[in-house]
Image (cartoon, helix red, strand yellow):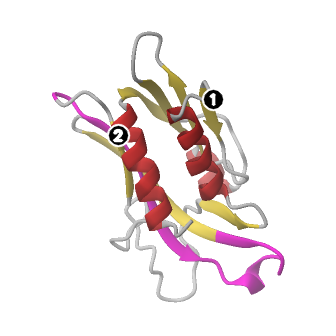
């Protein structure tokens, strides 16, 4: 799991992205590759989960390793081919850290969340992450959601990017 941690250690917030299994190519077009993912937004004692989880539960608490080929209630996907969205996110964050970009706005092709990272006016970076559980649950993009805002450091962003590249092999 790739984990972006806030700079606040007293009431820590995190964004966690959990890699899941790749979808079989036959389910989609042969020139595309998709991977299930899970997201967790944590702020102090509050925790919101959406999609795949590596403990065999999806965000709403139902079993995602469904016995009789029934699909789980939530489907959160990253495109890996023809355009690798995880690689693109990691590249943009690295460019932000290097000062080549002032902000990153990331929203996957299947819009189950939005991530915005901008340079803070004084130091560090502001992070906003919003979940669209409507899209993940019904397939209809709603723009309604729940999210977190936090500040983070250059080191935390670099660690998150390293974890993304390692966890998603990109």
Q: Where residue 139 is drawn, which disc sits there?
A: none
Left or right: 15, with 26 as reference point: left
Residue 19 x, y percent position in the rendering: 48, 66
Between 108 and 136, which is closer to the camera in this rendering? 108
Q: Where residue 101 is drawn, which disc sits there?
A: 1
Q: Is 19 in the magenta? A: yes
Residue at 52% from the left image edge and 63% from the top image edge: 37
Mark 2 = which residue? Answer: 156
The quarter in which the C terminus is drawn is bottom right
Q: Is 116 in the magenta? A: no
Local secondary structure at mark 2: helix
Instruction: State the residue lying farthest toward the bottom.
Output: 68
Residue 56 position (above or below residue 17):
below
Tally of numbered tags: 2
Residue at 49% from the left image edge and 61% from the top image edge: 165
Left or right: 81, with 120 as reference point: right
Range of residues picked out in magenta: 10-34
Residue 56 x, y percent position in the rendering: 37, 74
Residue at 34% from the left image edge and 41% from the top image edge: 14
Residue at 64% from the left image edge and 78% from the top image edge: 23
Between 123 and 13, which is closer to the camera in this rendering? 123
Q: Mark 2 or mark 1, which is nearer the start of the sequence?
A: 1
| Residue 42 seen from this side | no
Q: Indicate the quadrant where residue 145 lies.
A: top right
Between 94 and 149, which is closer to the camera in this rendering? 94
Residue 129 x, y percent position in the rendering: 50, 35
Gap in Å between the C-alphas at discs 1 and 2? Answer: 17 Å
């Amino acid at each position: 799991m790739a984990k972006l941690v806030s700079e606040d250690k007293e009431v820590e917030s995190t964004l966690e992205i959990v890699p899941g299994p790749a979808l079989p190519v036959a389910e989609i077009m042969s020139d595309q590759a998709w991977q299930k993912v899970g997201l967790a937004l944590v702020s102090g004692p509050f925790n919101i989960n959406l999609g795949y989880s590596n403990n065999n539960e999806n965000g709403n608490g139902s079993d995602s390793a469904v016995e009789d080929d029934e699909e789980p209630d939530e489907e959160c996907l990253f495109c890996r081919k023809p355009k690798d969205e995880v690689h693109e996110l990691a590249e943009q964050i690295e460019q932000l850290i290097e000062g080549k970009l002032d902000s990153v706005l990331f929203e996957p092709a299947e819009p189950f969340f939005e991530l915005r990272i901008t340079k803070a006016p004084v130091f560090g970076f502001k992070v906003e992450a919003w979940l669209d559980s409507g899209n993940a649950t019904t397939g209809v993009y709603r723009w309604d959601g729940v999210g977190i805002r936090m500040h983070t450091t250059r080191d935390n962003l670099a660690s998150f990017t390293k974890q993304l590249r390692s966890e998603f092999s990109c």
